[in-house]
Image: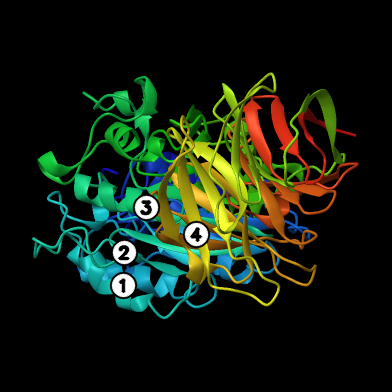
């Protein structure tokens, strides 16, 4: 934000002070920054915090099953304790932090994000105040800070931020994910040491990664951010960066900050040629990741409150929210998973009321609103199969896996792979294999099959083997033995990665799905929130709903979102014991079952 000095109170300020029984000398307003309305309300906010409920409505207690993320807007409201002395206070910042600390339990606060411009003057006395304010939250709730343009110099040097909020301040906390450490060939201290950071937390069965990016983050920072988002693609992602929404083009005059067309900004303030505008940050990084669903920003006090929803490259909805309220409040975002809703409330701790309107943004709907966001199934009905048609597929052995390339059907028996036309005509079969073959998936002209020695006593002999789609000739074998104990079961492919589930000989087990990259290097292991009968035999990714379909060895089947969150689980039952599953098209799945000599074309319905 920009700053203007106000040396003495205006007539309107004095009248307002008299109205609430306040007397203030000109010294009380000395050195207050930004436009008149911000500065006079800063002073008034000090005096009326306990006695002037200007906004009236209460912020209700967060009910069980919900949780809140609090967003602190720019906190530049510093004033000197005495004229010409390097002693400062920030009663607004102190009040905001105190309210959050007091209401962590009442509002079920799981995370706090500061949008940046934590100071007004990038000088140690103000940084001392800022750290003292944030100390009220330190060790009590996870938090992160985006470095604003006032928190650095124009070149991007944020050394004072790094001095007062370094990485070493946070590494003791298990929720602190890490920071941008620079590039190996550079000794520069720009952008490093917590100037760009990420945090990890969970709430109500949902897992999050929260990225805090500095103002106008350069390309090397965005590359790091993309790597963080890829590594934690199984988590829901929120981004806070200082500049985001506001005047789309660089303002040419003062009125442009208020009146010019607004949206994602195409201009910048920091890092010179290396810096990226908000639009460039969106294009180069943020839009490319399917788990990103929210971007928070500040910076624009003359826009103050604004929101828009955009679509990422994976058709994911991304809510972009600007809040730069000054003394008009902070944001409390209450997540209500069972309603698939985020209730965004602008609450003013200075007045103990909801902000229903401001001089710049009088519309209450811009300050108090709900956002749709899918977090869990509504549980409205049990899933079931609706059979479209049957296809006779006689085999010599029990059927295991099923897959399709959209033109052909592939069936895996215990030791042999078969290829059919979609009308049921058998056109090829593989040589008999040595080891037990399970689920299959078809990717890039190859059939990938989960293979194991598969013994009740356990084994470390597990592979994923690949066969050519045309000839069914063996192509390659990938050893995954260290990640399974009994039997590799279902296998699926999503976003360049393979997902292999384990099956068992009993029901006393913990279901899990192991994720590998394209070269079958281990990425992570997903623990699933249920015990399916005899483990997971069938697995398929469904892009239309961003879910995995999971088949047990019994009649039970499940759906879970691509982040494997327990809150997203849906279930159903078939009238027969299941095996594998394959997606033919949007509304049609192929399923098989062990002893029957047929394949079913089905669609999923809710009872």
* Sequence-first disc among 1 and 3: 1
Q: Mark 2 highlights which residue?
A: 179
Q: Nearer the viewer, residue 119 or 557?
A: 557
Mark 4 or 1 closer to N-term? Answer: 1
Instruction: Looking at the image, tell me whether mark 4 or mark 3 is earlier in sequence order.
Output: 4
In front: label 2 or label 3 = 3
Q: CA distance from mark 4 to mark 3?
A: 13 Å
Q: Position of residue 587 (x, y in %)?
A: 70, 24
Q: CA distance from mark 1 to mark 3?
A: 34 Å
Nearer to us: label 4 or label 3 = 4
* Numbered label attached to residue 519: 3
Q: Earlier in the sequence, mark 4 or mark 2?
A: 2
Quarter assignment of residue 262: top left
Residue closer to the observer: 105 or 373: 373
Task: Answer whether labels 4 and 2 touch (C-beta < 8 Å).
Answer: no
Vertical placement of residue 146 versus 481, above or below: above
Is the residue under label 3 in contact with that under label 4 (CB below 8 Å)?
no
Give coordinates of residue 360: x percent, y percent. Answer: 47, 32
How many angstroms separate mark 4 from mark 2 (CA)?
36 Å
Q: Looking at the image, which is closer to me, 556 or 58?
A: 556
Badge 4 local density, few (<14 within 10 Å), some, or many (20+)? many
Give the structural element (helix, strand or loop) at label 2. strand
Q: Which residue is mark 1?
A: 167
Q: Secondary structure at mark 1?
A: helix
Q: Are marks 1 and 2 in contact (CB under 8 Å)?
A: yes
> Which mark is on residue 384?
none
Location of residue 529 in the rendering, given as x and y in whole percent from the top left corner: 71, 61
Q: Which mark is residue 463?
A: 4
């Amino acid at each position: 934000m920009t700053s203007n000095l106000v040396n003495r109170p205006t007539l309107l300020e004095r009248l307002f002070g008299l109205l609430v029984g306040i007397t203030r000398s000109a010294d009380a307003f000395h050195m207050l920054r930004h436009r008149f309305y911000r500065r006079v309300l800063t002073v008034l906010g000090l005096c009326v915090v306990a006695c002037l409920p200007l906004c009236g409505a209460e912020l209700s207690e967060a009910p069980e099953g919900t949780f809140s993320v609090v967003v602190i807007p720019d906190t530049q409201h510093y004033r000197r304790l005495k004229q010409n002395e390097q002693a400062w206070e920030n009663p607004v910042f102190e009040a905001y932090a105190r309210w959050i600390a007091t209401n962590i339990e009442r509002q079920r606060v799981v995370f706090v994000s500061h949008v940046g411009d934590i100071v007004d003057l990038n000088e140690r006395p103000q940084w001392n105040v800022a750290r003292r304010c944030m100390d009220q939250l330190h060790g009590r709730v996870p938090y992160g800070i985006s470095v604003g343009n006032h928190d650095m110099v124009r070149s991007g040097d944020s050394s004072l931020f790094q001095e007062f909020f370094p990485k070493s301040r946070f590494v003791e906390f298990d929720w602190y994910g890490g920071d941008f450490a620079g590039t190996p060939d550079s000794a520069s201290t720009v952008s490093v040491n917590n100037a760009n950071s990420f945090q990890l937390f969970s709430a109500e069965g949902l897992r999050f990664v929260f990225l805090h990016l500095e103002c106008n983050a350069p390309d090397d920072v965005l590359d790091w951010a993309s790597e963080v988002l890829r590594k934690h693609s199984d988590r829901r992602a929120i981004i806070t960066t200082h500049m985001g929404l506001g005047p789309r083009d660089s303002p040419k005059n003062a009125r442009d900050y208020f009146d010019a067309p607004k949206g994602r900004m195409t201009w910048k303030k920091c890092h010179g040629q290396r810096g990226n505008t908000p639009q460039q940050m969106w294009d180069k990084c943020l839009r490319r990741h399917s788990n990103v669903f929210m971007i928070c920003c500040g910076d624009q006090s003359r826009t103050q409150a604004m929101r828009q929803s955009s679509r990422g490259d994976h058709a994911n909805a991304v809510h972009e929210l600007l809040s730069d309220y000054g003394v008009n409040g902070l944001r409390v975002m209450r997540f209500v998973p069972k309603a698939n809703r985020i209730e965004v409330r602008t609450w003013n701790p200075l007045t103990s009321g909801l902000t229903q309107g401001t001089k710049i943004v009088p519309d209450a709907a811009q300050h108090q609103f709900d956002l749709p966001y899918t977090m869990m199934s509504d549980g409205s009905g049990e899933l079931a199969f609706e059979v479209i048609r049957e296809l006779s597929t006689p085999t010599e052995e029990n059927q295991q896996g099923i897959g399709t390339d959209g033109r052909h059907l592939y069936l895996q028996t215990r030791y042999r792979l078969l290829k059919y036309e979609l009308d049921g005509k058998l056109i090829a079969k593989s040589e008999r294999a040595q080891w037990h073959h399970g689920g299959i998936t078809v990717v890039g002209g190859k059939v990938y099959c989960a293979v194991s020695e598969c013994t009740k006593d356990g084994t470390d002999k597990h592979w994923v083997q690949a066969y050519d789609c045309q000839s069914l000739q063996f192509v390659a074998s990938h050893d995954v033995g260290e990640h399974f104990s009994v039997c590799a079961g279902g296998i699926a492919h999503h976003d360049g990665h393979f997902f292999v589930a384990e099956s068992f000989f009993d029901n006393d087990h913990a279901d899990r799905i192991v994720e590998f990259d394209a070269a079958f290097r281990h990425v992570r292991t997903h623990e699933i929130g249920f015990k399916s009968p005899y483990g997971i035999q069938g697995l398929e990714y469904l892009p239309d709903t961003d879910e995995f379909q999971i088949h047990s060895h019994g009649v039970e089947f499940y759906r879970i979102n691509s982040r494997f969150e327990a809150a997203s689980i849906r279930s159903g039952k078939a009238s027969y014991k299941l095996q594998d599953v394959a997606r033919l098209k949007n509304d049609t799945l192929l399923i098989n079952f062990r002893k029957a000599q047929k394949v079913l074309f089905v669609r999923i319905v809710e009872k």
